[in-house]
Amino acid sequence: MLDNYKKILVGLDGSVEATKAFDKAVATAIRNKAELVIANIIDLRAFQSISAYDSVVADDTHKGAENLIADFAAEAKKAGVEKVSTRVEFGSPKVMLGQTLPQEENIELIVLGATGLSYIERIFIGSVADYIIKNAPCDVLVVRQ
């Protein structure tokens, strides 16, 4: 990576792969003296099975995501990232991480974990990483290990 990135986005969902991406994003942010934007996107599809979408459920989910992100933000600052910001949003992870947040935040690099969707899941849902690689307005780093 020869570019000097000023603003880096990492998407977190609590998975092992996302944690690996976070570690790589922190190291890259420190090396580039970049701002790190840590995001958690609450997938609205998760609420489709709830017959009456309840604002209490949404609030609880949002608070849980904020707590998760706050822990990672504290860890990034402790590691030496000088500027850290967080975003918790409802929506499609593909679109939010691949287009909306990069445009709103002027992101220069997106760091993602490579997730292990099954073949069937990829057919019906598609890979978030695949979508972002094809549609992002900036560089994308997919962390495998």
Image (tube, rainbow, N blue to C red):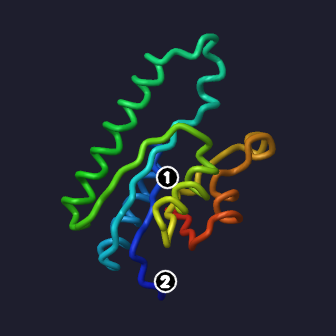
From mark 2 to mark 1, how far is it between C-alphas? 21 Å
| Local crowd size for mark 1, using a 10 Å CA cut-off: few (<14), some (14–19), many (≥20) | some
- The residue that label 1 is drawn on is 17
| Local crowd size for mark 2, using a 10 Å CA cut-off: few (<14), some (14–19), many (≥20) | few
Q: Which mark is residue 1?
A: 2
Q: Position of residue 107 (x, y in %)?
A: 48, 67
Q: Residue at the location (57% across, 69% down)?
A: 140
Q: Is residue 78 left or right of residue 15?
A: left
Mark nearest the camera among 2 and 1 is: 2
Q: Position of residue 77 (x, y in %)?
A: 22, 59
- The vertical placement of 119 against 47, above or below, is below
Q: Position of residue 22 (x, y in %)?
A: 40, 58
Q: Residue at the location (27% across, 45% down)?
A: 71
The residue nearer to you, when weighing 75 against 70, is: 70
Secondary element type, mark 1: helix
Q: Is residue 74 left or right of residue 2?
A: left
What amino acid does circle 1 point to? Answer: Glu
Secondary element type, mark 2: loop
What amino acid does circle 2 point to? Answer: Met
The residue nearer to you, when weighing 43 against 123, is: 43
